[in-house]
Amino acid sequence: MKLLVFSDSHSSTRNLIKALSDHPDAEVIFHLGDGVADIRSLPELTANKAVFTVNGNFEDFFTPDAEKSRYEIVQFAGKKFYLCHGHRHLSSYSLGDPLSPIINQAASKGCDFALFGHTHCKLDRYIPPEELPADTGKGLYLFNPGSISRPRDSSYPSYGIIEIRGDSVLTSHALIGAKE
């Protein structure tokens, strides 16, 4: 099963269209906020796919009902996904790892993945079970797709690809416009 992970499109659909066109075999689409209307505006490319979105600070500002989806938990291919934008979780003032709130939330809910955006920076990290605060007996994939429109960590917009085949998981980032 192939899942595509987007975040921070900020009213730009050009790169979403390219990514969706490049992966017609994707079965699940996650948009992690700051542009959820962008993915919803492409029904011709998302038809017959499961599409899940969570609101970001962009939606909080422009959408009166933004409170309704601060995070979502969904399951596919035997894996549990914690989805959030991150703006309500991340803190540069926290002691230790600023990602701790996301890690704690996802681990306490027994999730296999914690997916978030907001930073516009790619992240792909696996945390083994013994390093997690909750004793779930399983590790946690911490994943940020970067920004599909306005990257802060490279010259190229990015998105995430998660492939699940049985117990095997492959996480990766794709760059829009980079030479192969």
Image: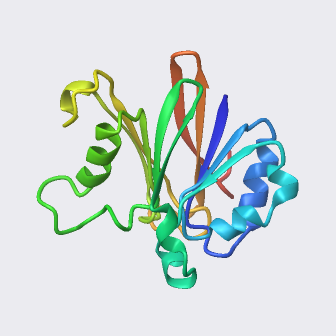
Q: Could you say which quadrant of the image residue 28 lies in?
A: top right
> Residue 122 location, x and y as percent?
46, 53
> Residue 102 location, x and y as percent?
32, 51
Q: Residue at x 73, y 38 (%)?
A: 26
> Residue 105 location, x and y as percent?
31, 47
Residue at far top of view: 166
Q: Nearer the viewer, residue 102 or 23?
A: 102
Residue 41, compared with residue 5, is above or below; it is below
Q: Quadrant of the N terminus?
A: top right
Residue 164, compared with residue 14, is above or below; it is above
Q: Nearer the viewer, residue 34 or 109?
A: 109
Q: Is residue 63 left or right of residue 47?
A: left
Q: Is residue 99 left or right of residue 124?
A: left
Q: Residue at x 49, y 77 (%)?
A: 60
Q: Residue at x 69, y 58 (%)?
A: 177
Q: Is residue 53 left or right of residue 118?
A: right
Q: Quadrant of the C terminus?
A: top right
Q: Residue at x 81, y 41 (%)?
A: 24
Q: Could you say which quadrant of the image residue 158 lies in?
A: bottom right
